[in-house]
């Protein structure tokens, strides 16, 4: 028998000692009670293993070497997953064995972990100007889905109004999740803002919520956000805003312009893209009963004991499926605790001035890219009068080339062009969504512009 | 068995203030390049780049510290956390706390993976797409089913995804209005109830009989033309294996329902039992449990969703395909449930699980299961013979267990007044993470569910048993010692069960300060 490095008791002598103690001749004798009819009749058919660590490393590194990454090319892709700078301290902390390999330990053994969770929710609370923030969920899409379901449970209504140009992938996830809620599209105006007349015509006594992304999926600030909230409230609906936290050092948090429920994606807060794997969702509200009791997630509350020590424990757990199974508020399982640890570290590293400078840096550079790309022949930048944050639309219809063709040509020059919008938003023609983050250099933008000049 | 030495342990106790209390205004931990001059020459001033009404008026009250202080703060908090790597993490049963190989961390922390964007051209992502595709083939073999999605971000989302597929299947067949009920067992994971309920199903929970699992008669009594399916774990949460599982599945199938197996607790079954032989139409595995991806403070994980050929078309999109030369992303799928999560799922868990399986092969996987069974049965014999006050439910009718056991401290509690929760708080004083008690409802009184996976040595198990014997002895001789524990944790006993409503909740420091202005 192989002595497996990860399996201490694959040692023959130890196995015999343990079997003797149990009084069994073999392990097979122990599990012989499993009925034959459900037992496998032949061994698993799996690839030959790399039993030594050095073989495994060579094998895995060989596969990963086939990838060509954003670090090895110039990247202008965003559309829900963003190439932000990850401070070294974030990786240092989330790589600590203690955090990486902890699980559901609680108040005592994992006091430190719970303090980090509490600091995560507390710092998010400051960023969002809200008192209640939940333990993070799977991704921003799940947070948005729960936000809609929260509104549905609060007012019992069954229609969610969502903008025409919201992230289609996000909408697909929300429509799959939100059982009993119908999604109705509110049109965008040609200038890029939400069509308030259309919104008014669709708001009615069945509207559970008005959902807005701000900045929008196409990258623009929705300047009517306060008015949209007033219209939602006027119809008795909840107002949900999905906001990119990397914008909140410079932009008002949604609660300040009337949002009842704030939600979004925490991947920008120190978490690597990892081919879209590094996601986590935040959800936050005011501290009111209708919201608090409608969170499906863990809520870690702070307590003080008789010695004056602070500690943390799960509070009001009777909401959750761990306690009341099918009667719970939605369901709750393992989500993304390590990303709470990471995002907390990130916000502590950035501080208020870092978050402001981050926003300003992105704002300057994305607008630089907008101006430069606007000068390309036959290329149109719609929504000229709008303010954009990190992303914006570039319309190549006039060039006679498709975005797919242009991106193939860019790729040959080591550039990942923007997200191709033509597949899901045909009304925008051959448009791409260009993303510029704080990692993008001005020279990178010039390189993109020069490359496009040659292509179109 | 002779007892092993108990260590004189004390967890780090840094008495670390909240990071807000350490803030020194003006301090910086990271600087961001100033591009205002160079870019501003093209864009104009910052004030013209944002709508006036949306500019943030008050800066967020985030803490301000220099980098060494931030790093030190979080390192101290890490030391006040007991991860699997640094303790004998036998207690957290149903969680399969096993060794997460360090080499696999190198793969997922490589820039060849971390710097990949999900919308990159497939030609630039042949490595990660190959891993997704290859691991799907492996999971097809391990489950015996025909297609796998890694999109669900945890076990709960895996069960939810199966419920979504099941619902779509019956919608397509025009039976959705008729088939409104899901059957599960009360000793299956609570998510086997909650996730189908989220999809609008009525949930019927079967209770165990004297054998530790529901009788076939009980099942037959609730199966009808309304049955959409059964969501079931086997072994159940208690470690009891349902030997008539095939009959369960057959009864549901005959009524037109589907069978969904929750394989979260799979560690004792590698190479022995598959979803296919159980007759399942769908199942899910937690890659952050039996497949070694670390638990990471409760995620990110991955609930690998496996389905039969008939159900493949309903799987979430995108899927990864291989044309013999090239791996590619397939977004098409008119029958698909859509998205369960964004992009392809938690691929760090997929990479680690793939590397873990590739390091073991078929023989290694079977050794995992057999060693988990050996460890558990060794510990079970010591536990029941040597730790006073401990018993095992259904011991008479169902004496066998595979990889985990739900024990009870009921006798200890009746004899001494020391509860399972008291024992749990005291474990940290010996250097152990707390144990998992039970899912709700507590069918077994004063429950305790350890799981000594294949990662633990005989000496590890002996140390754990010795600690429990010591705690039990204390309960009988000086119960107040256990009741007032812990003593060697970062904080002392906390009265934290008193919150009765939302007004007393404080999940943010700002909320706490509003309630306690003197804090």
Image (cartoon, grey):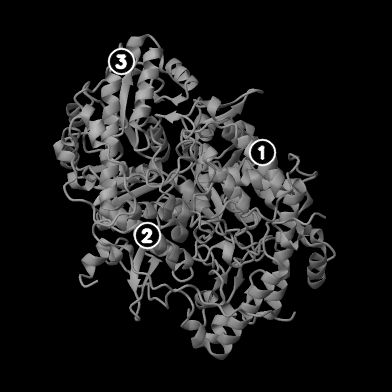
Residue A306's disc number: none
Quadrant of the rendered image containing residue A272: top left
Nearer the camera: disc 1 or disc 3: 3
Where is residue A248 shown, x and y percent of the image? 26, 45
Residue B273, visible in the rendered structure: no
Where is residue A18 shown, x and y percent of the image? 78, 69
Where is residue B89 shown, x and y percent of the image? 59, 65
Categorize mark 3 by other alpha carbons within 10 Å: few (<14), some (14-19), many (20+): some
What's the distance in space between the residues labelled 1 and 3, CA to CA? 50 Å
Labels 1 and 2 share a subunit? yes
Host chain of mark 2: B
Host chain of mark 1: B
| Quadrant holding the C terminus of chain B | bottom left
| Quadrant holding the N terminus of chain B | bottom right
| Dot 1 and dot 2 residues touching (CB under 8 Å) | no
The residue identified by callout 2 is: B70
The residue identified by callout 1 is: B140
Query: Is A417 in front, or is A189?
Result: A417
The vertical placement of A230 against A332, above or below, is: above
The vertical placement of A195 against B197, above or below, is: above
- Element under label 2? helix
């Amino acid at each position: 028998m192989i002595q497996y490095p990860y399996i201490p008791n694959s040692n023959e002598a130890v196995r015999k000692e343990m079997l003797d103690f149990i009084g069994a001749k073999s392990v097979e004798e122990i599990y012989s009670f499993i009925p034959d009819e459900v037992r496998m009749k032949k061994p698993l058919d799996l690839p030959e293993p790399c039993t030594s660590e050095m073989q495994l490393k060579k094998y895995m590194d060989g596969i990963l070497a086939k990838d060509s990454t954003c670090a090895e090319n110039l990247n202008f892709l965003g559309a829900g997953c963003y190439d932000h700078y990850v401070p070294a301290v974030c990786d240092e902390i989330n790589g600590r064995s203690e955090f990486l390999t902890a699980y559901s330990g609680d108040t005592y053994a994992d006091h430190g972990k719970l303090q980090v969770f509490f600091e995560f929710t507390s710092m998010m609370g400051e960023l969002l100007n809200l008192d209640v923030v939940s333990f993070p969920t799977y991704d921003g899409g799940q947070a948005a889905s729960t936000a809609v379901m929260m509104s549905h449970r609060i007012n019992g209504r069954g229609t969610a109004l969502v903008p025409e140009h919201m992230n289609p992938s996000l909408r697909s996830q929300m429509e799959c999740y939100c059982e009993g809620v119908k999604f109705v599209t509110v049109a965008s105006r040609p200038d890029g803002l939400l069509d308030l007349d259309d919104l008014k015509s669709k708001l009615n006594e069945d509207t559970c919520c008005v959902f807005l992304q701000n900045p929008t999926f196409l990258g623009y600030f929705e300047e009517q956000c306060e008015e949209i909230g007033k219209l939602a409230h006027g119809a008795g609906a909840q107002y949900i805003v999905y906001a990119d936290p990397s914008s909140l050092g410079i932009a008002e948090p949604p609660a300040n312009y009337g949002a009842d429920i704030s939600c979004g994606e925490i991947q920008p807060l120190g978490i690597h893209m990892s081919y879209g794997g590094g996601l986590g969702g935040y959800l936050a509200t005011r501290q009111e009963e209708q919201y608090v009791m409608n969170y499906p997630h863990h809520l870690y509350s702070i307590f003080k004991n008789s010695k004056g020590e602070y500690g943390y424990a799960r509070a009001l757990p009777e909401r959750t499926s761990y306690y009341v199974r099918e009667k719970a508020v939605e369901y709750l399982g393992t989500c993304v605790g390590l990303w709470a640890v990471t995002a907390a570290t990130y916000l502590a590293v950035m501080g208020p001035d870092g978050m402001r400078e981050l926003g300003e840096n992105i704002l300057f550079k994305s607008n630089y890219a907008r101006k430069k790309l606007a000068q390309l022949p036959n290329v149109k930048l719609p929504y000229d009068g709008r303010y954009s944050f990190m992303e914006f639309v570039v319309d190549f219809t006039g060039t006679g080339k498709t975005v797919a063709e242009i991106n193939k040509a860019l790729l040959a020059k080591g550039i990942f062009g923007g997200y191709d919008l033509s597949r899901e938003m045909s009304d925008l023609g051959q448009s791409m969504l260009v993303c510029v983050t704080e990692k993008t250099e001005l020279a990178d933008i010039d390189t993109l512009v020069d490359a496009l000049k040659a292509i179109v | 068995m002779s007892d092993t030495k108990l260590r004189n342990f004390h967890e780090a106790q840094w008495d670390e203030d909240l990071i807000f209390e350490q803030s020194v205004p003006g301090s910086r931990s990271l600087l961001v390049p100033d591009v205002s001059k160079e870019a501003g020459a093209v864009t104009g001033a910052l004030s013209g780049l944002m709508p006036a009404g949306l500019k943030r008026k008050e800066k967020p009250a985030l803490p301000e510290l220099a980098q060494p202080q931030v790093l030190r703060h979080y390192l101290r908090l890490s030391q006040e956390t007991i991860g699997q790597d640094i303790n004998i993490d036998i207690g957290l049963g149903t969680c399969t706390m096993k060794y997460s190989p360090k080499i696999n961390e190198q793969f997922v922390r490589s820039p060849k993976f971390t710097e990949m964007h999900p919308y990159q051209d497939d030609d630039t992502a042949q490595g990660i797409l190959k891993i997704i595709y290859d691991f799907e083939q492996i999971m097809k073999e391990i489950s015996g089913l025909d297609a796998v999605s890694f999109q669900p971000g945890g076990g709960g989302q895996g069960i939810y995804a199966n419920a979504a597929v099941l619902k779509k299947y019956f919608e397509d067949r025009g039976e959705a209005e008729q088939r409104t009920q899901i059957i599960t067992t009360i000793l299956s994971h609570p998510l086997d109830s909650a996730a189908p309920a989220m999809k609008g199903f009525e949930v019927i929970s079967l209770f165990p009989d004297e054998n530790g699992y529901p009788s076939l008669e009980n099942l037959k009594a609730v199966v009808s033309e309304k049955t959409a399916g059964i969501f079931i774990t086997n072994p159940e949460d208690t470690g009891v294996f349902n030997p008539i599982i095939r009959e369960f599945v057959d009864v549901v199938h005959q009524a037109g329902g589907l069978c969904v197996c929750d394989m979260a607790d799979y560690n004792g079954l590698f190479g022995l039992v598959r979803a296919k032989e159980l007759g399942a139409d769908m199942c899910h595995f937690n890659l952050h449990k039996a497949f070694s991806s670390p638990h990471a403070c409760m995620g990110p994980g991955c609930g690998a969703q496996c389905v039969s050929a008939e159900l493949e078309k309903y799987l979430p999109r995108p899927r990864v395909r291989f044309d013999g030369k090239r791996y590619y992303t397939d977004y098409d799928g008119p029958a698909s449930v859509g998205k369960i999560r964004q992009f392809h799922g938690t691929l760090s868990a997929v990479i680690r699980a793939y590397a873990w399986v590739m390091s073991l092969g078929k023989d290694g996987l079977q050794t995992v299961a057999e060693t988990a069974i050996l460890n558990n049965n060794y510990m079970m014999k010591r536990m029941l013979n040597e730790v006073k006050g401990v018993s095992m439910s259904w011991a008479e009718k169902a004496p066998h267990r595979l990889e985990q056991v739900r024990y009870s401290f009921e006798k200890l509690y009746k004899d001494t007044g020391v509860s399972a929760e008291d024992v749990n708080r005291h474990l940290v004083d010996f250097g152990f993470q707390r144990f998992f008690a039970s899912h709700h409802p507590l069918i077994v009184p004063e429950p305790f569910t350890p799981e000594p996976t294949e990662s633990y040595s005989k000496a590890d198990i002996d140390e754990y048993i010795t600690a429990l014997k010591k705690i039990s002895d204390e309960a009988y001789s000086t119960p107040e010692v256990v009741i007032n524990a812990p003593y060697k944790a970062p904080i002392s006993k906390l009265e934290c069960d008193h919150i009765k409503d939302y007004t007393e909740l404080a999940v943010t420091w700002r909320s706490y300060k509003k309630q306690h202005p003197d804090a």
